[in-house]
Amino acid sequence: MTDPGGRIRALDPCRDSNYVLNDVEGMAGRVVSGTPRVPRRRVSMLVASASLAVGLAVAGIAASDAASTPPPNANDTPPQLPASAGLSPGAPGWTLVSTGSSRIYGGKGESPVDSREMGLDGGLLQLWVSTSTAQEYGTGQGLPLPVPLVFAQAHPGPIEATVDVLSFSKPSSPSRLLANPQFSQIGEGIPGDTVVSGAGLNGGTAMQILSDGNGGLTEYLFQWASGSSWYQVAELGAGMSVQQAQRFAQQVGN
């Protein structure tokens, strides 16, 4: 899936080093590193939090210089949001593999925005696979991600999905993230990322992502802001149309 790096949290826990599920429930030992390559949003869904000037004295940097260095942006892990904030358990045809809280940034290095200044007060990161996939492979360590192309081709449409939700106490923050190219990656000209015009949901954006890490599967990524929340949905499937991907994403947050 996409790098859920920068801000996007993309799909696969093993593929995306952007997302790291915090306080994961289910699928023991598996990490979702988005966001899902991040989405770049956070990379696309969370490893990186910058650490405060460690070892400056050892490095021979004067205390006066250290004092003038601004502290890194906060990248706090907020309380986990209820499942209803994402795709609710029991969604027809889908099985929840893992869930946890989420952070604003999952890339390497310092977060480009400060979670405290933004008013981040809740997060949710969910990994889903189609029920047919869960029946075939289970939801534990034996679950291959991405789902094998041959199996996906026999079950056309979305087959794997990552849902990433952030809530804020400041109403303007979701729209600010959506407009920030470090998170949306719109207009950054990243190879393999193509904006799908007119396919965005709720005034947001839609992208098709070509990645060797997807094992030949098609990936669509949606981002939008609604009320006090920011949403990102990344989906993988074989022969999947943008309309099929939209129908899944439209279930999120409802």
Image (tube, grey):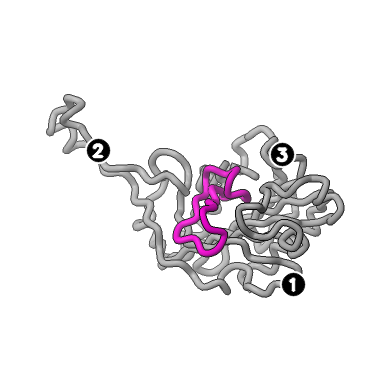
- Horizontal side, residue 83 vs residue 167: left or right: right
Point out the residue furthest to the top here. 60
Quadrant position of residue 68 = top left
Residue sitting at x 51%, y 64% = 25
How crowded is the residue under tag 3: few (<14 C-alpha within 10 Å), some, or many (20+)? Answer: some
Eye-nearest disc, 3 or 1: 1
Tell me how far mark 2 sits from mark 1, CA to CA: 49 Å
How crowded is the residue under tag 2: few (<14 C-alpha within 10 Å), some, or many (20+)? Answer: few
Which residue type does callout 1 highlight? Pro
Eye-nearest disc, 2 or 1: 1
Tell me how far mark 2 sits from mark 3, CA to CA: 37 Å
Q: Secondary structure at mark 3?
A: loop
Label 3 sits on residue: 210
The dot on residue 53 is 2
Give residue 79's position: percent from left, percent from top. Answer: 41, 66
Name the N-terminal-most of marks 3 and 1: 1
Give residue 88's position: percent from left, percent from top. Answer: 62, 72
Name the N-terminal-most of marks 2 and 1: 2
Query: Where is 82 relative to 16, above or below?
Result: below
Give the position of the C terminus as an image quadrant: bottom right
How crowded is the residue under tag 1: few (<14 C-alpha within 10 Å), some, or many (20+)? Answer: few
Q: Secondary structure at mark 2?
A: loop
Give the position of the N terminus as an image quadrant: top right
Range covered by the magenta-colored residues:
7-36
Which residue type does callout 2 highlight? Ala
Q: Secondary structure at mark 1?
A: loop
Give residue 191's position: percent from left, percent from top. Answer: 66, 32
Name the N-terminal-most of marks 2 and 3: 2
Tell me how far mark 3 sits from mark 1, CA to CA: 28 Å
Label 1 sits on residue: 92
Q: Is residue 16 magenta?
A: yes
